[in-house]
Amino acid sequence: MVKSFRVLILFSFFLMTCREQPTQPPQSKMQLTVLDASCIEAWVKISAITLPDTVSLLRDDSTVLTIALRQQDTIVVDRNLFPQHTYTYETREMTSGETSDPVKTTTMDTTSNSFTFEIDTLSTLITNSSFLTDVAIVNDTLAYAVGNIAATDSTGNAESYDMAVWNGTKWQLKQHYYQDNSIIAPVRGLYVNNANDIWLAAGGVFHWDGVSSLTPLVFSRLTLPDPNAFIEKVLEPSDNLLYGVGDAGTIVLFNGSSWHQIVSGTSMGLTDIYGANGKVLVTGTNDEYAQGIILSLSGSTCTTIEESDFITTDQLFKPKLYGDIATVWIDEKNTIYAAGNLLFWNKYNQWDYVRSLPENYLGGNQNIFYRGFIGKIRGNASNDMWIAGDRNTLRHFNGATWVQVGLPYDPNSAIAWPGLAVKGDLTIVVGENGRMAIAIVIKRK
């Protein structure tokens, strides 16, 4: 019995070792992933197993790029696509002719570039300089704009106003005072959570509960850690967390009960702050030397993520950007946009020009023919964004094309638009025309 059992075991083992193993499909040398697609561009990642290698990127069986691969993952951009169109991509290895598995992607649709607009001059006294610097939209019938507005009151007396409130039809001027009965104008920045929770930057930081029945309206002035700090912009990215940024690299943090100063690592004037998708970014600029900086804030920690300088084309993106950086914005896909002299973006940790904007490259836009300095970027999404600045620069991007909105662009115009807010189909832009405070209310048709 024992002997027969051993024979059975050996026979079973023999059958197991001789059984044919399933055939494994050959592994491709390349893998292809479409990371993102806008209306007119697609970002494709090519992952290689064998290096170095040279491959072609095919779109719908036509070669669009030839790439020398020197690292395992390489991201390339395919441009000049059509909106709302499906494309098929694959790669072909140049030596063997081997292709990757095809991958399909569909580009985004565009938004409308058709708008109506109304421009209002809010000041009435040309003898005093008037301007608006920032704006916030609560809803279709409520928005706030701030700055310094010289106008006559109902009795004909000259007055200074620091705020204009839009009720969906017209603007109403407001004055705000603090303890020593001094008006807080000029106001440089504001952040509005709702009609009863408004923060203003006017050297110091002020909070207003929005009680419109008080005349004049009264703010409670909050004590800053540095009495010499001049705060230009404010942002409340979450409950019990308020940032103020301003001149000489000043950043302050309010945690709901006390103020703290954050070391920024720069002496540049900080001009814009924006938060989205868990990120808070700040820009700074040095006009005299055409330099800029982009900072990232996380709690009380400040990190420099990019710098810019007066550099030549061969130095660009190695790693610095060019010129002043006055404004920053983050779209729904976490793409970072930064602008001043030029408009840049960062996708997948790579900086580049925003190439859809004509003449937007170092050496382009000769004699300020196409647009002026960009002071603000805001938008609803990557296919619905705005830029505003000096020389009456006010352009909308629908995902494929940029159009000037409002009055025609004029290189000699005195109009400057430093304040920009977008909410759905409503856009409000504020600024100055010479010595007069102006606002334009734009509605999508």
Image (cartoon, rainbow, N blue to C red):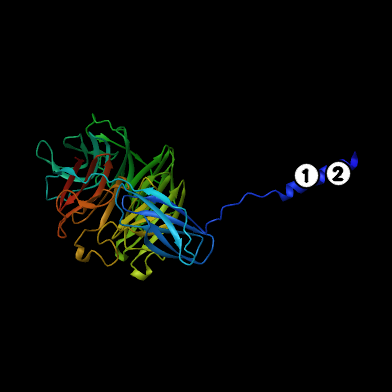
**Location of residue 168 (image quadrant):** top left
Which of the pair 199/424 is nearer the observer? 424
Residue 109 image point, x, y percent: 30, 45
Taking the spot 11% from the left edge, 50% from the top edge, the residue there is 126
Which of the pair 241/9 is nearer the observer? 9
**Location of residue 181 (image quadrant):** top left
Secondary structure, mark 1, is helix
Residue, far left = 156
Residue of label 2: 6
Q: Quadrant of the C terminus?
A: top left
Residue 213 image point, x, y percent: 23, 29
Is residue 124 visible in this depiction of the protein? yes
Secondary structure, mark 2, is helix
Residue of label 1: 12
Residue 237 image point, x, y percent: 39, 41
Going by the numbered disc 2, the residue's amino acid type is Arg
> Is residue 251 toward the left or the right of residue 361 in the image?
right
Q: Quadrant of the N terminus?
A: top right
As drawn, 381 above or below 266? above
As drawn, 54 above or below 232? below
Going by the numbered disc 1, the residue's amino acid type is Ser
**Location of residue 205 (image quadrant):** top left
Could you classify mark 1 by the number of other residues whose Cα lies within 10 Å: few (under 14), some (14-19), or many (20 or more)?
Answer: few
